[in-house]
Amino acid sequence: MPKKVLDARNITVTYKTEKGPLDTVRDVSLKICSGEIYGLVGESGSGKSTLARAIVRYLPENGYLKSGELELGDTNLLSLTKAEMRRVWGGRITMVHQDPNAAINPSVMIGEQIAEVVRTHLHLSKQEAKDKALEMLTKVRMADPEEVARRYAHQLSGGMLQRVLIAIAMATNPELLILDEPTTALDVTTEAVILDLIGDLMREYDTAVLYITHNLGVVARVCNRVGVLYAGEIMEEGSIGQVFKNKLHPYTRGLLGCVPRVDVNKKDISLKAIPGFIPRPDQLPPGCVFAPRCELVEEACREARPALKDIENGHLTACRRYEALKGYGDVIADTREAHEEAGYGELVLEARNIKKYFPVPGGMALFSKSKKQEVKAVDDISVRMRHSFTMGIVGESGCGKTTFARCIMGLEEATSGEIELEGELLPYSVAKRTRDTLRKMQMVFQNPDASLNPQHPAGEAVARPLVLLRNLNKNAVQERVKELFEAVNLPEDYIYRLPHELSGGEKQRVAIARAFAADPTLMICDEPISSLDVSVQAALMNLLVDLQESKGTSYLFISHDLAAVRHLSDWIAVVYLGRLWEIGSAEDVFVPPYHPYTEALLSALPIPDLDVKQESIRLKGSVPSAMNIPSGCRFHTRCPRKIGEICEKEEPPWQDTGYYHQICCHIPAAELQALQGEGLLKKGEGRAAQ
Amino acid sequence: MTYFLLRRIGFILITLILASIIIFSITQLLPGDVARVILGQFATERAIENLREELGLNRPLHVQYLHWAGGFVRGDWGNSLISRTPVRPIVMQRLGNSAMLAGLALLIYVPLGIILGVIAALKKDKLPDQLITGVSMAFVGLPEFVTGLLLITFLAIGLEWFPANSSINPDSTFRQAFPYLILPAITVSLTGLGYIARMTRSGTIDVLKTDYIRAADLKGLPASQVLFKHVLRNSLLPTVTVVAMGIGWLLGGLIVTEAVYGYPGLGRLIVYSIQRQDLPLLQACSMIIVAIYSISNLAADITYGLLNPRIRVGN
């Protein structure tokens, strides 16, 4: 019988602000038992991190626990002094945070950062602590623990650092482990490895885990129970099966509807974005907090706040109308009206054999005669894009996808290759391109905070290309700005707002409006939605699809998010270490035969659907340095399907599997097909059946 | 690292060459004729012409420059025009005196500045911080002749704790000079303190905000261990740079302080050489100061590199 580890009852957390005290988390209760992984899901602003900080009593100075009870085992945490809490921290409760690069002290060796915890809490001697550090590093499957222990943070990759943080967190065998978005900053392949590790360790340690994330797919993969947090309140809670199967709150349904599916794309469905925004804590509606955005809302919902109600066996929902939801069917996404088959449009972009080598700075080039070191960021990539067409480029970080996009844009000068836009050969550097070329090619960057000038109102950002690239007069510019704001679904008065007065999604809409202001034929989107919440992502993806339909723009869409790429793209190119490995239509790339790398990416992708069966194919290590590219097939060092020496010695051939779907692998396509069978994303005995 | 060092030393050489050209050119532009300065205003034209010939002042400028620069490299820094003795021992002696003052000042203001900076950071925006930041900024702003005179008035004349005048014999030992060093050292410390405290404060505040300090707290380490092991190791890095660069200022830039106390350091020597138009002396002093600045800058970078594993260990 698992024992109760964390019992938090009726927690309300308040922040003192200029507008007076604001309750950011209200009346939330959490119970977590030993051996249980409790997933707390919510979008930014839902209060999930605040709740975690309240549980460990590590709130920022202006925050305090207004009411509630907090027990860890038999200890009443609220009765402890600060000094006594320090004994709980790191000993009985440990935490792992989002950004592993930032969470490890850059000036202290890795081994010592593990050893100091066990010295403090387990009172081990120096030598015992060192041994314990090595033991923990082995536990988190570090290949060479002694070597790693002597290293500093900057010498390890993000995935390795996150393993170190987990080693630190588990070293004292805590009662409660809090994981706050532990894989959000990692690549999908690394994420999968870390999630497996967490799952295995939890089977061994019997620790209670609070797993905070925005990613429903991750919850579906590792958690036993899940609580859905919205605007500081729990909307629905239950076992994974209960919540993902029955979805008895409209917000849960909304969140699931926002996640693009890997088996269909924009031609079939449009994502179901949740309209509106999370209410700010100072503007909460009187009734149900989700009522303003709810489709099922009725008058009674707006009057009084519904209580969380246990429907069956610990499945709780805060929706008054859950009975109605049961009959509402499985609304995941809207089907789209029949899509006209566009056929072959005109060729917009043709990039042939693009290479980009960066010289390695600083080396000993001055004194040694050895060949100059180079980072081969992009090493021979060719793509063709047609009118009103989306090419998705996927790959892990460091695979060269962004550099490739920047070469096309001219922001980086390609080392060699040819870039043709509508049949016209372009110079490498953006500085040498004509105004008209600049107008035809626009870019949307990942981080709208960095790509919008904080001093300029949003409207001015959108007006710049109109003035610079299209020579419109003042009145025409104003007209166009209004139209563009309307096109990206922003209210007209936002024209005069400064970037800091906009939310992340709104800023990205402004950035998209700015790109469209130039009326481009080709738009390069470099991870445009990655930093946004799922509901905002869905709205932006729909916006991109709509704009493409009305304007005929082609997108080069770069993302590490396979589901987003699958949803938006007509054609997908898979990149690894500066080269393409598979290219084909979105439908073909996501069904067997796949390239083993594509297969690993797909297998790693966390899918919020318990019926999808995924085999766990995991890649070893991280992407090798582009300075020392492996011989033969560049993927052979990590390939789970490596067949032998040929992979190390010879570059693999391109194989055509029909309809221009091509795979670059030594394994014959037919054999791959046989090995991969039905594929990874077929519905069937998934976790639900276990 | 070796490559980095060689490169930096190369840059220092270039700096020194450029500086020597500038120094040489500027000293040529000073008003007045050297020979006339030496011989006085009643000397005959012939005597002046003879002396000019003897000093080589009639040769073309670039020849004069090469002669001077070549001598400088060989250790022959020329003779003082006034005392007619070699310049080098004079400069080196004064440099030694400056070093004594600099050493004592560093011992006072570096530890104090770090302590105050850390306290200010830990009590950010509260009274101790406002007090430390406000007062230290006031001292940075006050010119040294004001703080110097205030110290003399209160500590030397009022309380008679220290001598008011520090014009010691230029060849005193540290032990002999010590009582005379205290007031000038405090004066420069008041300026230096503000820089160190501010740098430490902002460095520490930045580090206190990082994820790894939050992580260290949540590891349950004792608060003192979090501060000394995790915070200071990172937050003092920028301070180290400021300290090393302060050495250049202490050795060559204390013209006002040395004048106020009459202390025979390098700064006083420069003023003297300008007043007396003693060109070889002025050139040597200036070159030494440029060299000290370059070297302390390099020292700053090297210490930073040694303390920062990201630079020390590489990937």
Image (cartoon, coloured by chain):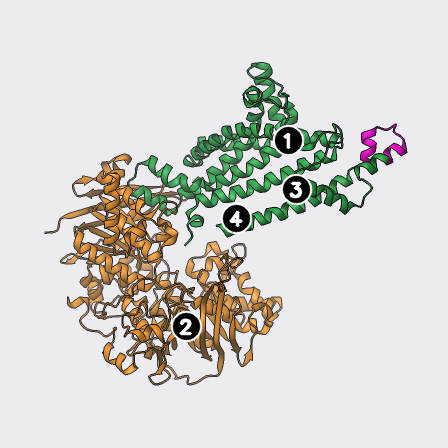
Q: Mark 4 = which residue?
A: B5
Quarter location, residue A594:
bottom left
- Residue assigned mark 3: B73
Cα distance, mark 2 to mark 1?
Answer: 63 Å
Q: Which residue is mark 2?
A: A579
Depth check, mark 3 against mark 1: the one in front is 3
Asked whether disc 3 touches disc 1, contact meaning CB atoms under 8 Å apart, the reply is no
- The tag earlier along the polypeptide, 1 or 4, is 4
- Which chain is the one coloured green? B
Instruction: Relative to A192, say whether B303 is above or below.
Output: above
Q: What amino acid is labelled 1 in the image?
A: Leu
Q: Which color has been applied to chain A in this rendered view?
A: orange
In the rendered image, residue A438 lying in the magenta stretch gets the answer no
From the top left corner, tell me how far across and down residue A260 is, in percent. 32, 69
Q: Secondary structure at mark 3?
A: helix
Nearer the observer, disc 2 or disc 1? 1
Judged from the image, the secondary structure of the residue bearing numbered disc 1 is helix
Magenta stretch in the rendered image: B33-49
Q: Say above or below: B294 vs B145.
A: below
Q: Going 36% across and 45% down the picture, which residue do you hit?
A: A108
Residue identified by numbered label 1: B266
